[in-house]
Each structure stands twice: as C-alpha cells, then as structure tokens.
Amino acid sequence: MMDGTKMSSEVHSFVARAATLLSLATVGLAVSSDRAAAQATDAAAGQKVYAQVCLGCHTEAGTGNPGVYPPLDGSEWVNSAPERLLNILIHGLTGPVTVAGEEYTGLMPGWGASLKDAEIAAVATYIRSAWGNFSNAISEAQVAAVRAATKARTTPWTAAELVAATPAEK
Ligand code: HEC
C-alpha cells in the first residue's frame, strides 16, 4: 500500500512541474507572437510609405516597368545585405545596374532627405517581405547606423561602387 503523504507530495511535485512547463511554453508563445506582431506592424506602416512614395514607379505588384523602372519583387538588391539596400534607399542609385537579369540605366534619387529612419526601416521591411520576397526585417537602428557611416556622401551610388563598399549576403 502506498503511503498517503508520499503520494500526495509526489502528485504535488508533478503538478508543480507541469505548471512550470506550461508557463514556460506560454511565455515562449507570447514572445514569438509579440515579435510577429512587431514585424507585421512595421510591414503595414511600410506598405503605406510604399504606396505614397514608391508605387508610382515600382508598381503595386513590385514588378517595375521593364526597361525603365526595375522590379523589387525578386530583386537581388532588395534581398541583399541590409547595408546595401539601405544605401540605395538613403542615397539613391544611378545606372547601369542589372536587376533580375535585366540592365537599367536610370537614376533614382535618394530618399534619405525626405524619409525618417523609421519610415525607411518600415518600407525596407515591407519590400523585403512583400510579393515573393522573404528577407528579414530592418530596424530603425540599422538605418541610423548606415546614415551615420555614410553621412559625407552627397551623390547616388553606382552599382559597381556599392558592390565594392558593402557585403552581399543577408
Ligand atoms: C521616380 C521613380 C522612382 C521612385 C518614386 C522610386 N524609385 Fe526606386 N528606382 C527607380 C529607378 C529608375 C531605379 C534604377 C536606377 C538605376 O538605373 O540605377 C530604382 C532602383 C531601386 C532599387 C534598386 C534596384 C532594384 O530594383 O532592386 C531599389 C531597392 C528601389 N529602387 C527601391 C525604391 C523604394 C523603396 C522606393 C520608395 C521609397 C523607390 N524605389 C522609389 C525609380 C524610382
């Protein structure tokens, strides 16, 4: 026969352990859903900036206009190392540049003077997660760091210069 006191203390410690595991699992869930919510908010704010500032040239579907405005959907520049994309957004880009196998010889002025760090982070996060793109989110601090590191720059990048100055990988 089992001793009643021993059994109830075993039951008690089992219940306590289960409760601890359960609360750890709940904390884990809360943290990951918070993170998802923060990214979703950024992308939603970024979609607004995109609609106001970028959509006219790059189109709602991110396809651009062949030969004139390059695509953002599937672009190796959008899905590159954050420094590379952020330099394009802050300072602009002047062709020739190859995007998804096609060459463009246009000019995009930088948006660094008209958009705040938070807006650039949001629009960068949006274009990296919209359509078929699947790259990580960009923070306001990353934008501030690129701005600070390149504050002497006054002209748009050429693609060749940018490739030499920044890493390619995500
Ligand atoms: C007036 C038209 C215009 C607007 C508005 C515009 N762009 Fe561009 N964008 C261009 C052109 C033209 C190029 C290619 C420049 C070149 O040939 O070097 C370009 C290039 C790019 C590139 C690098 C190439 C690629 O296709 O990935 C990115 C990224 C980009 N734009 C993002 C944006 C974002 C984000 C906005 C809004 C904040 C924006 N652009 C607004 C015209 C525009």
Image (tube, grey):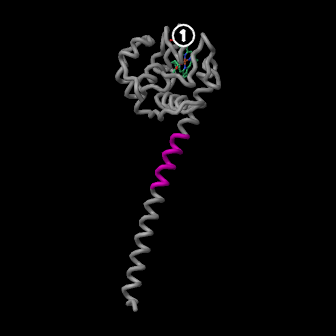
Q: What's the residue at 41%, 84% (across, down)?
A: 8
Residue 101 percent across, percent down from the top left: 53, 15
Ligand 1 falls in quadrant: top right
Residue 129 percent across, percent down from the top left: 54, 33
Residue type at mark 1? Tyr
Looking at the rendering, which quadrant does residue 27 occupy? bottom left
Q: Quadrant of the C terminus?
A: top left
Q: What's the residue at 55%, 13% (across, down)?
A: 102
SS for callout 1: strand
Q: Is residue 1 above or below residue 63?
A: below
Pointer 1: residues within 10 angstroms few (<14), some, or many (20+)?
some
Q: What's the residue at 36%, 85% (across, down)?
A: 6
Q: Nearer the viewer, residue 117 or 72?
A: 72
Residue 133 percent across, percent down from the top left: 54, 30
- Please count the marks in the image: 1
Residue 96 percent across, percent down from the top left: 49, 8
Query: Is 72 left, or right, of 113 in this rendering?
Result: right
Residue stretch in magenta: 28-40
Q: Is residue 100 magenta?
A: no
CB at disc 1 and ligand 1 closer than 8 Å: yes
Looking at the rendering, which quadrant does residue 18 occupy? bottom left
